[in-house]
Amino acid sequence: MRLPKISTPIAVLVLAGAVAVSAATGAVAGSLITGAQIKNGSITTKDVKDGSLKAVDLKGGGVGTAGPAGPAGVSGYEILTATGTATSNSEGISATRACPSGKKVLGATASLERRFSTAPVIKYLGDNTVDAFAINDNGGPDTVTLTVFCAKVG
């Protein structure tokens, strides 16, 4: 069976009409839905476009009362250093540094000048003092540098 040939202008008109009807139908359907038709609790976060709601759109204004003030943060931050030197092989190297009164150690790091000695071990001696220790096994002098990070902690 052979289908009749449809001319191009007729096909374009039919297609344009179908597009117009489908576009109009969506707009009409969108205007027919009201808030009274939406079941309470059925709209979720994924249904709401970001930035489309304001605090006044939410129950109770969406903004509660301010909570209590949080604790004071960190202040008076400073970085301190100390060095220790070993002049001969197999000698221990130590450097100790304390934070000023009222400040606590937030952290520490240690390094060696020649880097052939054993890696320094950092030991925290209470809240405000740190010690770094290494064994000099490089055959010559070496220096350990301890860096301590101190601050007042609220």
Image (cartoon, grey):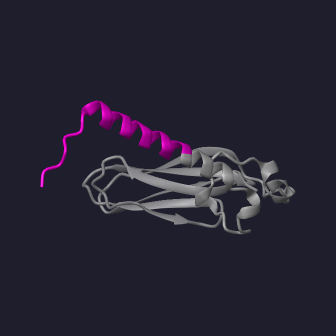
Q: Is residue 91 visible?
A: yes
Q: Nearer the viewer, residue 76 or 15?
A: 15
The percent position of residue 45, horizontal first and vertical second, equals 62, 60
The residue that appears at 63% across and 54% down in the rendered structure is: 48
What secondary structure predominates along the stretch shown in magenta?
Answer: helix
Which image quadrant: the C terminus? bottom right
Q: Is residue 135 left or right of residue 33?
A: left
The percent position of residue 134, horizontal first and vertical second, equals 39, 61
Q: Nearer the viewer, residue 60 or 43?
A: 43
Quarter of the figure with residue 58: bottom right
Question: Is residue 56 one of those drawn in magenta?
Answer: no
Q: Is residue 95 left or right of residue 58?
A: left
Q: Is residue 26 left or right of residue 56?
A: left
The residue that appears at 65% across and 45% down in the rendered structure is: 51
Q: Is residue 49 visible?
A: no
Q: Nearer the viewer, residue 28 or 85?
A: 28
Question: Is residue 5 one of those drawn in magenta?
Answer: yes
Range of magenta residues? 1-24
The percent position of residue 4, horizontal first and vertical second, equals 19, 44
Quarter of the figure with residue 7: top left
The residue that appears at 78% across and 54% down in the rendered structure is: 72
Q: Residue furthest left?
A: 1
